[in-house]
């Protein structure tokens, strides 16, 4: 439902990925799009535009934001305006079951007293407040299922007169049209627990005449300003848009941005080193292969146990980082290692597993702010490979020159003989490819464009 902050969608996307990709559970994700409500109608008046047009603009913007955050789209989007006939039938069923009543003005309210003590499951998690409405309500807690139309408002025909659905009824109706009388998981922000989810439960169980409509409600907490109890909110004008956020940070980054970037840098460096080792570009001391295979198996087990324990993602990430630490300990570079046995397979397995886990968490180390550039990257890789191959040949020649008597003028090629990232940067198509010198061999590493160039310029005078 388009009623909670984007952070909720990211969190629940990760949970869906965990359920499907690690535990093999089939998840059918349906999302209700509220394309008519009081706020949309009010804004349409202010901007002198049709509510349908305004809602469509909001929906497109929402979908673009979710795509930029790499949130997996639901199996189906269901709009309220396309399901009003189902909503009318659903309300009529609640009335027939004795749990709702129509007023002479043309409103329909849910009768809280008709369900006795079953109402109030989420009271205590939030501050309960009754909804404003007609003075003809039987109980101040009664909430609207159908609202009579006011001048210049969109409306639909119903047995109670022209009007439109109440806020809560849309979700119950549309969820029931997909999943029937019961669903497994209902998600949303904690601010929706009461009254929205509370009212959904009441009206759904009243319609289906069941004891429990949803098996689990998952509520996501608020985003808060750093060092403050104040939540991030549009009404408080203290929020940042997803578009602006991604100008500074990529979709891979989490709440603690500095720590996330450090962790991603550690992971990226290990992946590059491991790939270089597999290609024979990084010469190392003998690797304790059996120990790494055991460590990989232990990590897989630890990650599954952590995620099976209430989705403990911090503990799972810690296990992966521990695996990377042990992998790095085995990648001890040396200048020459002729005749030393190599163990590329175990590092290939580690790379594959780490990539898989990162994908479960929605992280792609090759993702850039400009979007999916996989095709262009593929074309550029060949060029960069040739450049780094040429660099390796120059470094090998420099090593040979160092063994010869001095000549006049003296050569400066020996300056390339060092380990680690080079101060030189290849820039192609707005992206940077800094070479890494590993012994006499050079390799390259893809980094993000403009920001990396700026950092290099700051650190290395031209």
Image: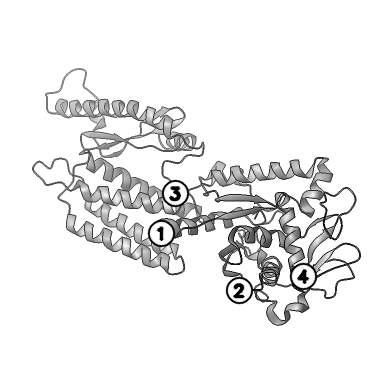
| Residue positioned 70% across, 82% down in the render | 117
- Which mark sits nearer the N-terminus, 1 or 2? 1
> Dot 2: few (<14), some (14–19), or many (≥20) neighbours within 10 Å?
some
Regarding mark 4 in the picture, which secondary structure is present there?
Answer: helix
136 versus 113 height, above or below = above
Left or right? Give the position of 287 relative to 185: left
The residue nearer to you, when weighing 214 against 265, is 214
Q: Write down the quadrant of residue 236 in the picture.
A: bottom right
- The disc at residue 105 is none
Task: From the top left corner, tell me how far across and down residue 375 is, in percent.
Answer: 42, 31
Note whether residue 123 is visible: yes
Task: Give the image's coloring scheme.
Answer: one colour
Note whether residue 461 is visible: no
Regarding mark 2 in the picture, which secondary structure is present there?
Answer: loop
- Which mark sits nearer the N-terminus, 1 or 4? 1
459 versus 216 height, above or below = above
Task: Give the residue pinned by disc 2.
Answer: 212
- Give the mark toward the camera: 4 or 3: 4
135 versus 63 height, above or below = below
Q: Marks 4 and 3, how far apart in space?
A: 50 Å
- The disc at residue 363 is 3
Residues tagged 3 and 1 counted as in contact (Cβ below 8 A) = no
Regarding mark 3 in the picture, which secondary structure is present there?
Answer: loop
Q: Marks 3 and 1, how far apart in space?
A: 20 Å
Residues tagged 1 and 2 counted as in contact (Cβ below 8 A) = no
- The disc at residue 24 is 1
Task: Give the residue pinned by disc 4.
Answer: 96
Q: Given the current orientation, which residue lies at the most extreme top position?
A: 408
417 versus 142 height, above or below = above
> Dot 1: few (<14), some (14–19), or many (≥20) neighbours within 10 Å?
few
- Which mark sits nearer the N-terminus, 2 or 4? 4
């Amino acid at each position: 439902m388009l009623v909670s902050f984007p952070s909720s969608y990211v969190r629940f996307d990760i949970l869906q990925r965990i359920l499907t990709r690690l535990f093999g559970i089939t998840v059918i994700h349906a999302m209700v799009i509220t394309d008519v409500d009081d706020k949309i109608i009010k804004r349409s008046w202010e901007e002198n535009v049709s509510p349908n047009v305004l809602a469509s603009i909001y929906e497109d913007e929402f979908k673009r934001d979710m795509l930029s955050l790499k949130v997996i789209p639901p199996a189906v989007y269901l709009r309220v305006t396309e399901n009003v006939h189902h909503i009318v039938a659903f309300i009529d069923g609640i009335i027939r079951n004795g749990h709702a009543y129509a007023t002479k003005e043309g409103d329909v309210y849910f009768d809280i007293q008709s369900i006795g003590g079953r109402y109030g499951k989420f009271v205590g998690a939030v501050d309960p407040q009754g909804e404003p409405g007609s003075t003809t309500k039987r109980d101040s807690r009664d909430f609207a299922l159908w609202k009579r139309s006011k001048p210049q408002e969109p409306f639909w025909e119903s047995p109670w007169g022209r009007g439109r659905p109440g806020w809560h009824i849309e979700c119950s109706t549309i969820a029931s049209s997909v999943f029937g009388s019961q669903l497994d998981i209902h998600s949303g922000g904690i601010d929706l627990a009461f009254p929205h989810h509370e009212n959904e439960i009441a009206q759904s169980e009243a319609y289906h005449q069941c004891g429990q409509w949803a098996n689990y409600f998952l509520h996501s907490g608020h985003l808060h300003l750093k060092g403050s109890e104040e939540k991030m909110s549009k009404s408080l004008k203290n929020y940042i848009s997803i578009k602006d956020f991604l100008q500074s940070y990529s979709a891979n980054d989490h709440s603690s941005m500095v720590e996330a970037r450090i962790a991603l840098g550690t992971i990226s460096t290990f992946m590059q080193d491991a790939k270089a080792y597999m290609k024979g570009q990084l010469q190392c001391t003998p690797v304790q292969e059996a120990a790494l295979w055991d460590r990989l198996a232990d990590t897989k087990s630890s990650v599954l146990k952590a995620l099976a324990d209430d989705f403990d993602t911090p503990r799972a990430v810690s296990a992966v980082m521990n695996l990377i630490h042990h992998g790095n300990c085995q990648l001890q570079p040396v200048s020459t290692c002729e005749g030393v046995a190599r163990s590329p397979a175990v590092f290939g397995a580690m790379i594959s597993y780490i990539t898989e886990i990162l994908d479960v968490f929605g992280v792609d180390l090759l993702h850039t702010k400009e979007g999916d550039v996989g095709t262009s990257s593929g074309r550029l890789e060949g060029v960069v490979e040739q450049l780094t191959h040429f660099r390796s040949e120059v470094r090998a020649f420099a090593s040979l020159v160092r063994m010869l008597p001095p000549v006049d003028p003296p050569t400066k090629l020996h300056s390339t003989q060092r380990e680690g990232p080079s101060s030189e940067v290849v820039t192609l198509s707005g992206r940077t490819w800094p070479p890494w010198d590993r012994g006499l061999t050079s390799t390259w590493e893809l980094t993000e464009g403009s920001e990396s160039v700026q950092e290099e310029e700051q650190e290395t005078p031209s």
